[in-house]
Image (cartoon, helix red, strand yellow):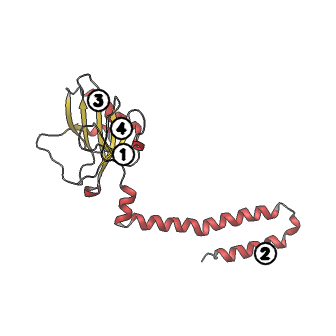
Amino acid sequence: MFPSPPSILTSLAKAEHKNGHLGKWAAPTMRVRVCILVVLAVVVPLALLAYGFFSHTFIGFLMLNQNPGWFHRGRYTQIVERIRAMNLSPGEWHLRLDDVSAPASLRRVGEDETFTRGDGAGCVWAEVKPDGNLKVVIETRDLGHAGEYGFAYSDGPLTMSSMGSDGAWYQVDLPGHLNIVTPDMQIDNHWWKVLYNLD
């Protein structure tokens, strides 16, 4: 069993007093060591307990997962380039990634193919403008009634329309239904985090 933080502090204090002849540099060094031990003995276990609680409860799961996940720029750029290489005619297209982590799994969705609530991760919507400009939405998480999340790409700037008088939420002109953003969800000139949580 590990000694408690108070007993650690007492032992270190006795050692510091005993070795007082080491001079003025001994006390500051000992204080640093005490601080490190306190962090290791108290703060780290508390942080692990908090994470364990949140990751294993429904509310905690939602708090940790109501987002699109990590932005894998290289992977998502490959998806955009694969869509561009399809030479799709102008209009909106529904595509599918059978494996969200594998750009090579991208395919067109069949005419009779449908996806149930919660199975939207991997859905991709593409819109080709008459001038060739491309917009792409990649759904990375579908939490059902808790929302759908993903990333959007656009060759050009997106038009934002306010969803309320407070100006907190906006809809952007994208293919598919994942078109809700806040201004801080813009990643760069071409990429956005997007979501849909209206049902």
Q: Residues within 10 Å of mark 2 (few under 14, many from 20)?
A: few
Identify the residue position indicated by label 3 in the image.
134
Q: Secondary structure at mark 4?
A: helix
| Distance of label 1 from label 3 (alpha carbons) | 27 Å
Disc 3 crowd, CA 10 A, few/some/many (<14, 14-19, 20+): many
Task: Answer left or right for 48 relative to 149.
Answer: right
If you read the primary sequence from the N terminus, does the residue marked by circle 1 or circle 2 appear first?
A: 2
Q: Position of residue 198 (x, y in %)?
A: 25, 52
* Horizontal relation, residue 129 to residue 61: left or right: left
The amino acid on which the numbered mark 3 sits, given as a three-letter code, is Leu
Residue that mark 4 sits on: 76
Residue 41 on image: x %, y %: 61, 69
Amino acid type at image mark 2: Lys
Q: Which numbered tag is attached to residue 14?
A: 2
Residue 126, quarter of the rendered image: top left
* Of residues 121 and 153, the one drawn nearer to the viewer in this rendering: 153
Q: Residue at x 47, y 66 (%)?
A: 50
Disc number lying in front (4 or 1) = 1
The first of marks 4 and 1 along the sequence is 4
Q: Which mark is residue 167?
A: 1
